[in-house]
Image (cartoon, rainbow, N blue to C red):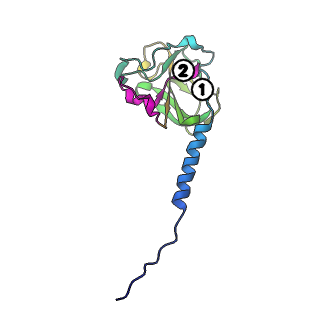
């Protein structure tokens, strides 16, 4: 009886290299410090209600996953942090909106804009004007304001609680505490 020998292909380190590179990129993103500024020009902490994050009931979304910063129509909206514009367009209840991917893999969502002053794929520096305060989306007929929320691509499971939609707290961070 003859034994057939199967020739083994040389091991490729490609998969291991890709995984290592992916982990390296994730770690670098988590190590970049993030210090935010208020995303409406010349606004202060008095321009939003500090208790509206995760307030229930809040319209069709159930809970409010951000803060509403009130300002005159057309007031400049600035990037709270530097980052990459990963989305710009009209987004249902948010109306005209922009999402910026910033340090620590945080997504900064700016909604109810009147105008955009940036475009998809661009890099913005903290403080750059990206749009203007408006009443688009479900803010139509209400006082002009910027809805600002921060979510994370890397979940924080310890934030999950028994409140309404509490499991989503793994992904949403309280902008009020981040802006102070």
Q: In what element is the residue under mark 1? A: loop
**Which x, y percent locates residue 172?**
46, 28
Residue 119 visible in the shown view:
no
In the displayed structure, 77 sits above or below 46; it is below
Q: In what element is the residue under mark 2? A: helix
Residue 101 left/right relative to 94: right
Say few, some or many: other residues with alpha carbon within 10 Å of mark 1 (under 14 / 14 to 19 / 20 or more): many
Identify the image quadrant of residue 133: top right
**Which x, y percent locates residue 155?**
46, 35
Give the residue pinned by disc 2.
177
- Quadrant of the rendering where the N terminus is positioned: bottom left
Residue that extends furthest to the front in the rendered view of this protein: 1
Identify the image quadrant of residue 59: top left
Residue 35 left/right relative to 161: right
- Quadrant of the rendering where the C terminus is positioned: top right
Is residue 156 located in the magenta-colored stretch of the structure? yes
Q: Earlier in the sequence, mark 1 or mark 2?
A: 1
**Which x, y percent locates residue 129?**
62, 26
Give the residue pinned by disc 1.
80
Q: Which residues are magenta?
A: 155-180
Identify the image quadrant of residue 53: top left
In the displayed structure, 72 sits above or below 130; it is above
**Which x, y percent locates residue 176?**
53, 19
How far apart are labels 1 and 2 at the CA level? 13 Å
């Amino acid at each position: 009886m003859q034994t057939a020998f199967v020739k083994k292909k040389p091991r490729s380190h490609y998969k291991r290299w890709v995984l290592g590179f992916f982990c390296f990129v994730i770690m670098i993103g988590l190590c970049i410090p993030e210090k935010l500024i208020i995303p409406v020009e010349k606004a202060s902490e008095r321009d939003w209600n500090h208790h509206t994050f995760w307030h229930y009931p809040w319209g069709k979304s159930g809970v409010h996953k951000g803060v509403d910063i009130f300002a005159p129509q057309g007031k400049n909206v600035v990037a709270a942090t530097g980052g990459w514009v990963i989305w710009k367009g009209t987004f249902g209840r948010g109306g005209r909106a922009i999402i910026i991917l910033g340090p620590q893999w945080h997504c900064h969502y700016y909604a109810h804009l009147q105008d955009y002053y940036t475009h998809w794929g661009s890099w913005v520096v903290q403080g750059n004007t990206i749009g203007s305060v408006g009443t688009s989306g479900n803010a139509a007929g209400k006082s002009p304001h910027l809805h600002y929320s921060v979510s994370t691509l890397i979940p924080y499971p310890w934030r999950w609680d028994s409140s309404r939609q509490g499991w989503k707290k793994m992904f949403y961070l309280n902008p009020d505490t981040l802006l102070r």
